[in-house]
Amino acid sequence: MTTLAELIIVAVILLNLSLAASGSLATCIRLAAAQGVIAALLPLLAGHGVPSGTIVFCCAVILLKGAIFPWLLTRARVKANVSRDAEPVIGYPASIILCLGAFAASSWLGTRLPLPETARVAWIVPASLSTIFTGFLLLTTRGKAITQVLGYLVIENGIYIFGLALFVEQPLMVEMAILLDVFVAVFVMGITIFHISREFDHIDTAELSQLGDWYPKQSGGEK
């Protein structure tokens, strides 16, 4: 079981690199969904004797991250009629290099953190921290609102994996609270993206931010 969990950790790291290298919104949605699903399997594989409550919770996470979230984001993407992200602030090759650098730094930090005995899976801390960094990278360097929502989901995946490494008492309750916040955020952002796409010809946040300079001039001057 532990070997399979370590293979999942490797897959999480490779998915981080794939997310950093992809400009297709449909591909990014599928990659984030796959990462969420395989991360949800970790509690079932990392230890011995899994409580029934943990199994139910993991199934709920798989349903949300593997089906509901991707459906909401895909629906928003289709309604907005966008297929690719805008040119990122940092290019795709540079994004991959930054992700590799983040993994190297996370590996060094992981050797310095005192972990409990429950953290049996190798590379779980580097994988979690580099996943959080990848989410921040998507959030801050990509132009489309949908990709930025994906950044929040990837950050939550990293927090989920990091919580497994530090396995405090009642970690599932903490994860449920975070997951509820993310669910509300994705749902609200999906509605927001839909309404923005109806009013404007794009959902590029860089261009939408210019409305703050345009509107006061129009409201104070000519209608």
Image: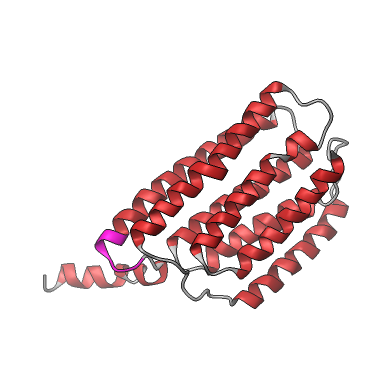
Asked if residue 190 lies in the magenta stretch, the reply is no
The quadrant where residue 21 appears: bottom right
* Residue 165: % across, % down: 78, 42
Relative to the observer, which residue lies in front, 124 or 113?
A: 124
Q: Residue at x 43, y 47 (%)?
A: 72
Q: Which is more toward the observer, 10 or 159?
A: 10
Find residue 32 and report its image quarter.
Answer: bottom right
What residue appears at the point 68 percent right and 71 percent down from the top-left corner? 96
**What range of the chain is rendered magenta?**
197-202
Q: How is the image coloured?
A: secondary structure
Q: Is residue 143 left or right of residue 195?
A: right
> Does the rendering let one see residue 115?
no
- Percent coordinates x, y for residue 140 in the rendering: 54, 65
Judge whether 164 appears above or below 86 on screen.
above
Question: x, y (%) of residue 104?
Answer: 80, 64
Looking at this view, name the residue that lies furthest to the top. 52
Kindly tell me whether residue 203 is visible in this rendering. Answer: yes
On screen, residue 214 versus residue 204, left or right, reads left
Q: In the figure, residue 91 lies in which quadrant?
A: bottom right
Q: Residue at x 74, y 40 (%)?
A: 42
Residue in the picture at 47% in, 69% down? 85
Check the picture and name the quadrant holding the N terminus: top right
Is 215 rendered above or below residue 163?
below
Q: Is residue 199 magenta?
A: yes
Q: Locate the C terminus by quadrant.
A: bottom left
Q: Nearer the viewer, residue 222 or 41?
A: 41
Residue 135 at x, y percent in the picture: 60, 58
